[in-house]
Image: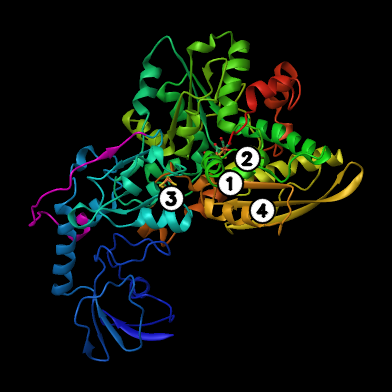
Amino acid sequence: KINMTINGIQVSVPKDYTVLLAAREAGIDIPTLCYLKDINEIAACRVCVVEVDINGVPMRNLPASCVLQVQEGMNVRTNTQRVRNAVRMNVELILANHNRECLTCLRNGTCELQKLCDELGIKDIEYQGEKREAKIDNLSHSIVRDSSKCILCGRCISTCRDVQGIGVLDFVNRGFNTEVAPAFNYSMKDVDCVYCGQCIQACPVAALRERTYIDDVWDAIDDPDKYVVVQTAPAVRASLGEEFGLPVGTRVTGKMVTALKMLGFDKVFDTNFSADLTIMEEGTELLQRVQNGGKLPMITSCSPGWIRYCEMKYPDFLDNLSTCKSPQQMFGAVLKSYYAEKEGIDPKKIVSVSVMPCTSKKTEANRPEMEVDGLRDVDFSITTRELGDMIKQARISFNKLSDGHADNIMGEYTGAGVIFGATGGVMEAALRTVADILTGKDLEQIEYQQVRGIEGVKEASVVLPIGGKDTEVKVAIAHGTKNAAKILDSVRAGEKNYHFIEVMACPGGCVHGGGQSHVSAKKRLDVNPKVNRANALYDEDKSLPIRKSHKNPEVIKLYEDYLKEPNGHLSHKLLHTHYAK
Ligand code: HC1
Ligand code: SF4
């Protein structure tokens, strides 16, 4: 332990602490901007500077507390005139070159720079200078980059490079013209970006944001000739409440359904339904591959960021991918065929909208192959944040809503469908069904704790009777593309053998997707959105009467009335695809 003084208070903290963390323990909240714990600790913005002496000897400059290690005998002051002036000047210099159109900014209200200016009491800006030329890259379906908002904090760069192991973004140009962009200032559309949106989650301002489709959805709702149907992904219910000030990870399933009905969607369904359907198709595919000597390990295909990553960095694994479309796409395909036929609706009039925790889903929905007979599976994919915005635009008091229930015949779901949104959830859902099928029993074991949690790479094995003999089925789970690379490298090197691998592109899985509610760097010191939101899904799973996908009555009916059997002819037409090198 290190003994030191902060603003006259004696503290004793672990040796590896920074002054910033020590101050927090002493109840002093040093301001930060570029700081993102464990991800971006680079003292770029110099908003966290402090005045320090060690055993009475003053440090000459004001050091940045986010990278300053604690030392015995340190005396730190965070609130002197000199510190206040320096912090204010550093923030004003950032503001001098920042597009300050706050009123019309997407991050108005969630911007960390705006909040900081308020907290520091900055009411005027002394430095008025030349502004960087604004360049807006909105060519991809998922991500918009706006250089006029960028404050060069580097949080996105560290996240993409160090957390995701991709490294699309970096500082380009020099001096006054420095900006954060892909190399050679290429569009995000033309680089190895997987559109995971983790850089958006890291961005304190609106320099990186999703491409929005809110107006397209409003237009469809307002068009009397259109029949507008919405599906909501498993993870959305664990974050949407945050848009309305509820604690991170509050489960708001029922209010979400009520709000969607009030917005004017003709039907409100649930992606959990098609998550259950995915388990039927994917579980059957796995059993067929295992029993018929097919390509193993089979790897899940529901995360579009992961698919893009596989296509770009591990094309030799494309045959390992399950041929199943993602639940988002399966839902759309079934909607415009089975549902349209049942209800006697012209499928051309159906507008298929998805609400996703994900920015990559927008690009997935726009992939050319994601259609059947010329009808797009999903017409518009919006994020949890965009749904929050629509609810606000409709002046709905979300927190006062009562609980609604999704419509029939694509709104019923099981606990297995819900947990898809947390890392390990698809694997657990698959195991629940595959184990029942192989043993021919309704097994008591439902929960597989080994595949839960936020460890980057997880492994488990289950003994199941395959072809009459007990076989050890080995599985692995990775979340975040950097962890996916670790597993694939070990499989490629022949060090590991698995039957089935789950990969989700985002750390934590969909609950921590690029389209979820923003959680500020400061808040992340106290709460872990990955854990809180996953718990919300596991709680919902526990609360449901049916927790295995193959017992979903609406999915059973879909097979009886329409698809006939998993991996059958119609399933292949509607629910499967393949990925070409
Ligand atoms: Fe996901 Fe999925 S779980 S990919 O994380 O398989 O986005 O929530 O909707 O499609 O079900 C996302 C979440 C989502 C799909 C499902
Ligand atoms: Fe990197 Fe993901 Fe952002 Fe693309 S979307 S730049 S891959 S963090």
Task: Say which mark, if any, is on residue 571.
Answer: none
Give the Cα distance between marks 2 and 4. Answer: 13 Å
Q: Closer to the camera, 117 or 490?
A: 490
| Residue at mark 2 to residue at mark 1: CA–CA distance | 7 Å
Q: Which mark is residue 318?
A: 2
Does the magenta segment cover residue 74?
no
Disc 1 marks a residue whose amino acid type is Tyr
How many residues crowd mark 1 within 10 Å: few (<14), some (14–19), many (20+)?
some
Which SS class for mark 3?
loop
Residues in magenta?
117-139
In x, y percent, where is residue 391?
A: 37, 32
Residue carrying label 1:
314
Indicate the position of residue 48 as horizontal and vertical percent values: 26, 68
Instruction: Estimate the spatial distance between the alpha carbons at disc 4 and disc 1, rounded to whole Å.
Output: 10 Å
572 over 317 or under it: above or below: above
- Under circle 1, the secondary element is loop
Q: Is residue 351 visible?
A: yes
**What is the distance, in whole Å, between disc 4 and disc 3 at their CAs?**
42 Å
Q: Which mark is residue 492?
A: 4
- Figure check: 564 above or below 397: above
Identified at 51% across, 34% down, the residue is 254
